[in-house]
Amino acid sequence: MSCNTSVTHVHISSVSQAQRAPVHLMPCEIEHNGPAQVSQYLTATTKDRKYEKTVSFRGRGLKGQELSCPQGYTGLVLKEVVDKPGSDQEDRTVRVSSVFDKVTYWNLETPPNSDDTVVMAMDWPELAEAIHGPVED
Amino acid sequence: MDLSSFEMDNSVSCRLASQIPDVCRTEDCCLGIDEAGRGPVLGPMVYGICFCPVSRKEKLKELKVADSKTLTEAERERLFQKLDESRNYVGWALQILSPNTISTSMLQRTKYNLNALSHDTAIALVQYALDNGVQLKEVYVDTVGPAEKYQEKLSQRFPGIEVTVKPKADSLFPIVSAASICAKVARDRVVKGWKFNEDLGDVDPDYGSGYPNDPKTKAWLLKYLDPVFGYPQFVRFSWSTAQTLMDSKAVPVHWDDDEEDGEKAAQRQNNKSMLSYFSASAGGNDQSQTHKTHRFFTERRLRSLNTL
């Protein structure tokens, strides 16, 4: 394991001011880090079918659904307060830029189902609680 | 021609059809198939069939239908009007393949090429006529691909029907000309009145013919390129014109089924390229873990994070 001695600070106070934002988990890697016209292109063309949502991105068919964050959890979008430091030895400070309690995740052509990785990943908090939580007699 | 059912959702494929003339259910009929808008990078491709009793072929000729490409838009509209007035013996049906259908089919994981899509659409339209009791005896098809193979395919699929597949059939057989007029009129109207589902405000309607070599179309494609999303669904993403513009002016997007190779791809996919054996060792790398992560976590792609 690389030894990481830097500390990341989170401005927790920023949570209360953070906007609730729609979040999409895409089945592809987009080499872009910055604003995008999500509501104009993606949201505007999304169709709510009976068992799934459908849309296309760059000409490819996507199928997806909404997924809630595990109970008791809130999703956070963090932004660097200052520019990312050059070395990983320096401390970093981030603020909460938006919060979410559900995500829309998209599969390439495959209808969403309970075996999808991100759906299964949501099992962990409950399992972790069972393993690590306090034991009552 | 009522296009409202397509305009309600122009992201999918849609069938429009006239009433079936009664006489087509009792008399032997001929049917023509043609397409409109195969080449353009913008808008739908429309497949059309037109049918009438074999005994009325001459009457159809008197309407002076001709290959839709040799006619002006106004002439096509006028001839469609005439066909519509002959509805007691002429029937038609159209399949509008939206540009989004074309893009997502051609770019599907298991590729579905334009020829296969065209053939399947044509077959479905003939089947539609048969299902509605049209007494088909002769089918005439215009084609761009190799005619013999296509003719064989259709003859096998529809035994008992005499199938003729010919290049330029739209100028040889009036029933094919009629089908080409129906298809072209629908394509023109759809392109002209395209309603953008994207929230783009007022879109410049000056997109030209939609053919990749039309300067107006080119200029429009440059103007409406979004760095992340590429284009609205009006554009066929599977066309090389659109792909080339996105490759040069939009941000790269990678899919798990991309056919890319070489060191860069391997690096991106976190694999080791052959070449990496020649580079200096990364020293204590983080991949050599002392214990193996349980399947529960790898299946869910869960990892411990020690940095953001």
Image (cartoon, helix red, strand yellow):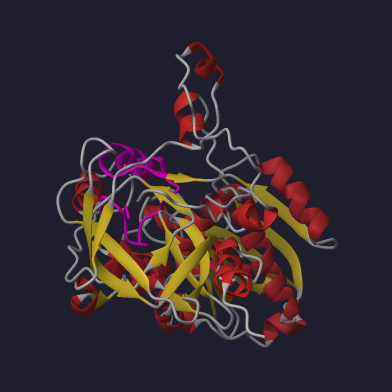
Q: Residue at x 72, y 70 (%)?
A: B127
Q: Does the magenta segment cover residue B270?
A: no
Q: Quadrant of the N terminus of chain B?
A: bottom left
Residue B61 shows up from this direction: yes
User: x, y (%) of residue B220?
Assistant: 21, 52
Q: Is residue B248 left or right of residue B299?
A: left
User: x, y (%) of residue B138?
Assistant: 73, 62
Q: Residue at x 60, y 50 (%)?
A: B109
Q: Tell which of B291 and B9 is nearer to you.
A: B291
Say if B292 sits above or below B182 in the image: above
Q: Does the magenta segment cover residue B250?
A: yes
Residue A35 shows up from this direction: no
Find the residue positioned furthest to the right: B160
User: x, y (%) of residue B23?
Assistant: 69, 84
Considering the whole magenta stretch, tell me its main secondary structure: loop
Q: Is residue B90 left or right of residue B74?
A: right
Q: Tell which of B104 and B192 is nearer to you.
A: B104
Q: Which residues are magenta?
A: B226-253
Q: Can you tell which quarter of the image residue A81 is in?
A: bottom left
User: x, y (%) of residue B167?
Assistant: 58, 44
